[in-house]
Image: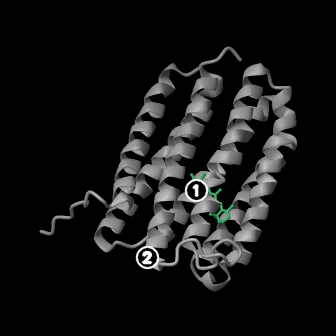
Amino acid sequence: MEHLKIASDNYVAFTFFIGTMAMMAASVFFFFELNSTPTKWRTSVLVSGLITFIAAVHYYYMRGYNLATGDSPTFFRYVDWILTVPLMCVEFYLITKKAGAKQGLLWKLIFASLVMLVTGYFGETIYRGSSVIWGVISGAAYFYIVYLVWFGEVSQLAQTAGAQVAKATKTLAWFVLVGWAIYPLGYILGTPGGLFGIQLVADAALASHYMDIVYNVADAINKIGFGLVIYSLSRSQD
Ligand SMILES: *C/C=C(C)/C=C/C=C(C)/C=C/C1=C(C)CCCC1(C)C
């Protein structure tokens, strides 16, 4: 049997490992807290747990894949995102629903997130040569989501849904604006197009390692952080 060991300077493998543990721990926490969660917030906290649980399973796989091959598990990374990012959109819909959010809003958010991720995947894989243009399209979809949660329907509905929902929505909007902006940074580091042609890391293998580290850190912040905001909302007076 082959024993795979994480070298002490292997930050890629390390962040995959710690990411797996963090996502697992967060899932256990959200699921076990469900029992003492007020009924009206139960679905929201359940979705928080599903997001970290789906990520935990993917991280477990990606951790092993990366340790065994040294490569970036791009495909499974995007499978994870395609499942978890729309669920984050569901969270926005669920917390603004009592203020009258319509399903149309949910579909707008989900559609934009799918455009953002599918075009990003194209730029990272099949059309690497034109990663800049795919990154720009993906970025446009991202800014549309930012617009919806900061100024559009989501923020307008949140204003009328009570002080705590308004506050939680604002915190989640910060996650989308700052936390999610870490991802394009990883993309710029890891794809050949760089920042509109400016290559930040010349060595391709190193570039892809940086990209994985950036994505792993971003996932931990965004998935667990998002879930904790929903959790603390569920413990508020609203
Ligand atoms: C849990 C996973 C999350 C919250 C993933 C979010 C991913 C993004 C916001 C990715 C955005 C991208 C761009 C805005 C442009 C370049 C391509 C992407 C897909 C990295």
Q: Which of 63 and 238 is in front in this view?
A: 63
Asked which quadrant contains residue 57, the reply is bottom left
Q: In this view, does 130 lie above or below 38?
A: below
Taking the view exactly as shown, the residue that stands out farthest to the bottom is: 129
Q: Which residue is drawn at 32% across and 61% down?
A: 10
Q: Which residue is drawn at 34% across and 53% down?
A: 17
Judge left or right: residue 55 versus residue 90. left
Secondary structure beneath dot 2 equals helix
* Quadrant for the N terminus in the image: bottom left
Residue to which mark 1 is pinned: 83
Ligand 1 found in image quarter: bottom right
The answer as to whether callout 1 falls within 8 Å of ligand 1 is no
Asked which quadrant contains residue 200, the reply is bottom right
Query: Amino acid type of disc 1?
Result: Leu
Q: Position of residue 9 (x, y in %)?
A: 30, 59
Q: Where is residue 20 in the image (x, y as percent from the top left)?
A: 38, 50
Judge left or right: residue 112 versus residue 84. right
Query: Amino acid type of disc 2?
Result: Ala
Secondary structure beneath dot 1 equals helix
Residue to which mark 2 is pinned: 205
Please indicate, yes or no, whether residue 168 appears anywhere in the rendered image.
Answer: yes
Judge left or right: residue 156 versus residue 163. right
Q: Which of the numbered marks, if any, corresponds to residue 233?
A: none
Q: Position of residue 157 (x, y in %)?
A: 85, 34
10 Å neighbourhood of mark 2: few (<14), some, or many (≥20)?
A: some
Q: Residue at x 72, y 66 (%)?
A: 138
Kindly report which numbered mark, 1 or 2, lies closer to the viewer in this rendering.
Answer: 2
Please indicate, yes or no, whether residue 100 appears anywhere in the rendered image.
Answer: no
Q: Which of 144 and 82 is in front in this view?
A: 144
Q: Position of residue 82 (x, y in %)?
A: 60, 60
Comes first in the chain, label 1 or label 2: 1
Q: Identify the image's colour scheme: rainbow, by chain, secondary structure or one colour.
A: one colour
